[in-house]
Image (cartoon, grey):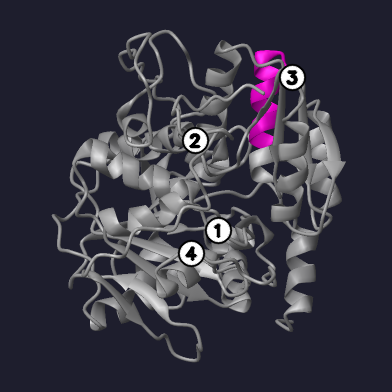
Amino acid sequence: MFNPCPSPRCAAGHGDLGTPARPLRRHLFLLHPPNSAAAAGEELGTRSEASRDTRSSCALYRARGGQRDCVGCPRVEQRVPPPTSPGQSIHRQGAMAAQPGRGEKPFHIVSPVLESLPLSQAAGTKVYMKLENVQPTGSFKIRGIGHLCQEAAKKGCRHFVCSSGGNAGLAAAYAAKKLGLPVTVVVPSTTGPATVRKLEELGAEVEVSGQVWDEANRRALELAQTEGWVSIHPFDHPLVWQGHASLVRELKDSLETKPDAILLAVGGGGLLAGVVAGLRQVGWQDVPIVAAETRGAHSFHAALAAGRLISLPDITSVAKCLGAKMVAARALECAQECQVISQVVEDAEAVRAVEQFLDDERMLVQPACGAALALLYTRRLQRLQHEGWLRTPLASVVVVVCGGSSIQVAQLQALKSQLGLE
């Protein structure tokens, strides 16, 4: 089986998920949020410089119904960083700073950074949205998955196989189509028919296996034993994190000064790992990350509280895209390297945030993304300031609008009914 990971310690194309995490450093503090029996793993955020609004006119947002100010327009020409040397090894840390080779165009776009007045009013500070929901496949996943697929294709891959609840599979199918290679996407039975249809339209062979992502992933690893087939892990691979790091480099180019915090959702930990890698690359290591999960899919939060990797008994949250029973080992390492504040929101808060965001910004996103938005709509940011975890005042924050490829209005209505919100 081809292994795209160059580390000699890796036999499965990613880090050793079973390796116990290193003991957490002293600056990692645990809090107990209200109405929660689970301990919260949080880190103290540090103060940083205020961000200034840099604006340019963007046709994308004129098309949304009126002139809006944004920075980081997707019309910006893709930057082509210098290549790495042909014989250079890319290990877990080395992969963080490495960038695509010269002349190779990535599959993702430079996504817009837009100031949101409604979110700013809710949060009491200037809020910038990093709109990953406008990526070609509808989520940030195309950054890392696309990069991993490109590297695997260079080394002779003949067939991709990816386990996914939706977004990673769509990214793998899109990349495979661009590269002219076949792909099999293994999804759990909870994956909606609309997502399956999108995968098939991109040319993927779809196989349903298990009820949760972890079970689908076991089947994908079995298929990856076939000669010439390569497993494209949805979140736990150094090349995936390297691709996701481009998001922060774009923020560095778009914002004149660094934000006081970055808000994002955590599922398996790939986005978190990529953002931490990007922060290190641009010298923003002191920018706190507020990592949101929904209760019932809070594997990162539980691991922080325990100080080691643990597996949730089941995924009970409606945010299925956050549904990894065990977070990547790299996510725990990130909590030791940067200030990471873990927050758990309820399903109802995430779904309400999705509905409010649709009204405010005319964009429909998934409950997984709603987890990060709920931090703003429920005034969690102000509570973290009051408790001393974030600086006061905050000049600006960035929220990563991670995706909306697997949600429709009918699904939103069904989720509201399921949670008794109507």
- Residue that badge 1 annotates: 369
Q: Which residues are magenta?
A: 170-181
| Circle 1 crowding by C-alpha within 10 Å: few under 14, some 14–19, many from 20 | many
- Give the residue displayed 71% in from the left and 38% down from the top: 221
Q: Is residue 173 magenta?
A: yes
On the rendered image, what quadrant is the C terminus found in? bottom right
- Residue that badge 3 annotates: 227
Amino acid bearing label 3:
Glu
On the image, the x and y values in percent for residue 177 come to 71, 20
| Circle 3 crowding by C-alpha within 10 Å: few under 14, some 14–19, many from 20 | few
Compared with 194, 225 (above or below) is: above
- What is the secondary structure assignment of the residue under circle 3? loop
Q: Earlier in the sequence, mark 3 or mark 1?
A: 3
Amino acid bearing label 4:
Phe
Compared with 67, 415 (above or below) is: below
- Residue that badge 2 annotates: 240
Q: Is residue 224 magenta?
A: no
Looking at the rendered image, the disc whose residue lies closer to the viewer, 3 or 4, is: 3
Compared with 405, 180 (above or below) is: above
**Main SS, magenta residues:** helix
Q: Nearer the viewer, residue 190 or 125?
A: 190
As drawn, is 357 to the left or to the right of 314?
Answer: left
Toward which corner of the image does residue 351 lie, by quadrant? bottom right
* Image mark for residue 300: 4
Q: Earlier in the sequence, mark 4 or mark 2?
A: 2
Q: Earlier in the sequence, mark 2 or mark 3?
A: 3
| Circle 4 crowding by C-alpha within 10 Å: few under 14, some 14–19, many from 20 | many
Looking at the rendered image, the disc whose residue lies closer to the viewer, 3 or 1, is: 3
Q: Earlier in the sequence, mark 1 or mark 2?
A: 2
- Give the residue displayed 62% in from the left and 58% down from the top: 324
